[in-house]
């Protein structure tokens, strides 16, 4: 399996296109409210203003949803997002995301000392080897766990 550490150029381009489409949708949706505020109290051509407002609102929401979907597919890949059922391709598509999540987790674990946080001491575990059977026993054991001889 080919391990990738970064997203492909095609994924990056598709993600950018999804951002642009979402941005246009947000602009259209917001523009509807701006035009409403500018024309507040003006009932000339009310039907046309209502149709324009509906077009901007629903068109903007539609573009936001489409752009977000495109970004999700670009980020996870076709198989990783569930469009195709191919487990090997899914693993390959999600490789950069999983690698990134692993790095984030490692960074978090480096920042937090779990033993100290949980109140555990950083003591070493000492084992004692039985002279009879060579079984490793904890230092506090009185009898061997392998053969039962007194340690």
Image (cartoon, rainbow, N blue to C red):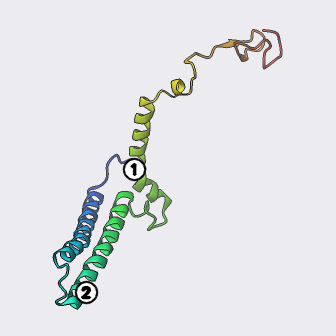
**Which is nearer the N-term, disc 1 or disc 2?**
2
- 141 up-or-down from 49: above or below: above
Res. 97 mark: 1
Outermost residue on the front side: it is 41
Residue for badge 2 = 51
Q: Nearer the viewer, mark 1 or mark 2?
A: 2
Res. 54 mark: none
**How many C-alpha atoms fall within 10 Å of the one at disc 2: few (<14), some, or many (≥20)?**
few
- Residue 98 picture location, percent across and down: 43, 48
Would residue 85 be seen by someone viewing this image from the given angle?
yes
Alpha carbon separation for disc pair 1 and 2: 43 Å
Q: Depth check: 91 or 23 in front?
A: 23
Q: Depth check: 60 or 68 in front?
A: 60
Q: Residue at x 75, y 14 (%)?
A: 141
Q: Residue at x 21, y 89 (%)?
A: 46
Q: Residue at x 83, y 16 (%)?
A: 148
- Residue 77 picture location, percent across and down: 38, 60
- 7 up-or-down from 39: above or below: above
* Element on which disc 2 rests: helix
Q: Quadrant of the C terminus?
A: top right
Q: Residue at x 72, y 13 (%)?
A: 140
Give residue 55's quadrant in the image.
bottom left
**How many C-alpha atoms fall within 10 Å of the one at disc 1: few (<14), some, or many (≥20)?**
some
Give residue 107's quadrant in the image.
top left
- Residue 26 picture location, percent across and down: 26, 68
Q: Quick check: marks 1 and 2 in contact, CB under 8 Å?
A: no
């Amino acid at each position: 399996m080919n391990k990738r550490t970064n997203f492909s150029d095609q994924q990056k381009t598709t993600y950018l296109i999804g951002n642009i489409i979402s941005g246009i949708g947000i602009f259209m949706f917001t523009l509807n409210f701006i035009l409403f505020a500018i024309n507040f109290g003006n009932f000339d051509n009310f039907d046309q203003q209502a149709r324009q407002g509906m077009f901007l609102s629903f068109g903007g929401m539609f573009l936001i949803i489409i752009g977000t979907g495109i970004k999700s597919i670009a980020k996870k890949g076709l198989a990783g997002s569930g469009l195709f059922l191919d487990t090997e391709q899914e693993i390959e598509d999600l490789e950069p995301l999983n690698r990134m999540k692993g790095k984030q987790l490692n960074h978090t674990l480096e920042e937090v000392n779990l033993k100290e946080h949980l109140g555990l001491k950083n003591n070493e575990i000492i084992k004692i080897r039985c002279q009879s059977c060579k079984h490793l026993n904890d230092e506090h054991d009185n009898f061997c766990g392998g053969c039962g001889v007194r340690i």
